[in-house]
């Protein structure tokens, strides 16, 4: 399915990048799609049914990106809070559009049951350039920490601060793509002056839970629902997915807080990160978006039933 890439074209193997290498990398990034027309316009179309707020403004050179979040119009202090995030890695398309599809098609089902807070595109610069990093060659999804080096991450943390300890659920929508192995992981290794070790790309949907609070039955409920929409990634010959042990079908886990991952930004008892495989010959873009929206619904349903 994948071939091992040649040495990354920027930098010296074994030596971490400096400013010159980061500048060279940035010079190679080009806008390939429009955040304004593909994301902001869809959010604007939701204003009649939901509250929309600007929670930050990214300014990168001449580029300005308003960061928008969608809230339940009938927000009530006595209801639990559900946080949905997408596009932390901007290139992961169904994370963004799956979040928007959930709001458009399913959010009304939870009126009066939960307060919804949805940040559908955390990294718009990366969305436009179909990249994992921001323009400073920083991965926002390793930057959810104090004094974050990524403004995308810092802005989301400020947004979430008021509901951090009230959240019942946080589901963070991601993809694992063939370009993870051909571009993004090799770039990461080159940036950090480390060797690149291929892991392979799993064919199918899987979840990343929190090793500090796995909530395995919750993860399995989401897998069961998504399996009705798209196929679940199998473990490899080592019983792993992307070099992590499979603890249940389609489920691995990370120490979310330790790694600075987005799914660690609340104290919610239920947390998960989705991973869709859009390059599979067995999945269409529509299936990927539907899988994300289905995962959100299944996660909310389980959390409400078991809170």
Image (cartoon, rainbow, N blue to C red):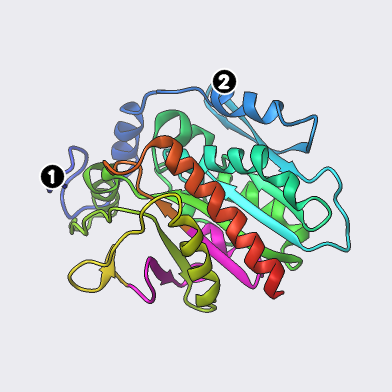
Asked if 237 appears above or below 160 in the picture, the reply is below
Q: Give the magenta part as a residue range.
A: 246-273
Q: Residues within 10 Å of mark 2 (few under 14, many from 20)?
A: few
Q: Position of residue 219 (x, y in %)?
A: 50, 69
Asked if 202 appears above or below 86 in the picture, the reply is below
Task: State the image quarter where residue 235 is shown.
Answer: bottom left
Q: Nearer the viewer, residue 269 or 190?
A: 269
Is residue 264 rendered magenta in the image? yes
Asked if 166 appears above or below 39 in the picture, the reply is below
Identify the element where label 1 is drawn.
loop
- Lower position in the chain sequence, tag 2 or tag 1: 1
Query: What label sits on residue 7 in the rendered view?
Result: 1
Query: What label sits on residue 287 in the rendered view?
Result: none
**In this view of the protein, can residue 90 be seen by the observer?**
no
**In this view of the protein, can residue 37 be seen by the observer?**
yes
Task: State the image quarter where residue 21 is shown.
Answer: top left
The alpha-carbon separation of the residues under discs 2 and 1 comes to: 36 Å
Q: Quadrant of the C terminus?
A: bottom right
Q: Which residue is mark 2?
A: 37
Q: Nearer the viewer, mark 2 or mark 1?
A: 2
């Amino acid at each position: 399915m994948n071939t091992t890439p040649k040495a990354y074209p920027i930098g010296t193997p074994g030596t971490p990048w400096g400013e010159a290498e980061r500048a060279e990398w940035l010079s190679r990034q080009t806008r390939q799609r429009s955040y304004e027309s593909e994301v902001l316009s869809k959010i604007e179309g939701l204003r009649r049914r939901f509250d929309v707020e600007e929670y930050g403004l990214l300014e990168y050179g001449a580029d300005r990106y308003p960061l928008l979040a969608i809230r339940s119009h009938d927000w009530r202090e006595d209801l639990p809070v559900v946080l949905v995030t997408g596009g932390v890695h901007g290139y992961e398309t169904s994370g963004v559009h799956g979040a928007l599809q959930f709001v458009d098609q399913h959010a009304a089902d939870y009126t009066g049951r939960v307060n919804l807070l949805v940040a559908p595109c955390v990294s718009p610069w990366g969305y436009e350039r179909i990249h994992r990093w921001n323009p400073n060659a920083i991965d926002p999804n390793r930057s959810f920490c104090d004094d974050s080096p990524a403004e995308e991450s810092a802005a989301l943390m400020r947004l979430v601060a008021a509901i951090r300890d009230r959240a019942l659920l946080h589901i963070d929508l991601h993809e694992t793509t063939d370009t993870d192995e051909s571009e993004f992981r090799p770039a990461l290794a080159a940036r950090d002056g480390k060797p690149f070790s291929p892991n392979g790309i799993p064919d199918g949907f899987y979840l990343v839970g929190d090793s500090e609070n796995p909530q395995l039955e919750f993860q399995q409920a989401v897998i069961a629902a998504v399996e009705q929409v798209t196929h679940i990634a199998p473990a490899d010959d080592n019983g792993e997915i992307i070099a992590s042990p499979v603890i249940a079908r389609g489920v691995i886990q990370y120490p979310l807080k330790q790694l600075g991952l987005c799914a660690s930004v609340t104290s919610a008892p239920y947390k998960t990160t989705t991973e869709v495989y859009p390059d599979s010959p067995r999945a269409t873009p529509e299936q990927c978006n539907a899988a994300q929206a289905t995962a959100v619904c299944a996660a909310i349903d389980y959390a409400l039933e078991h809170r």
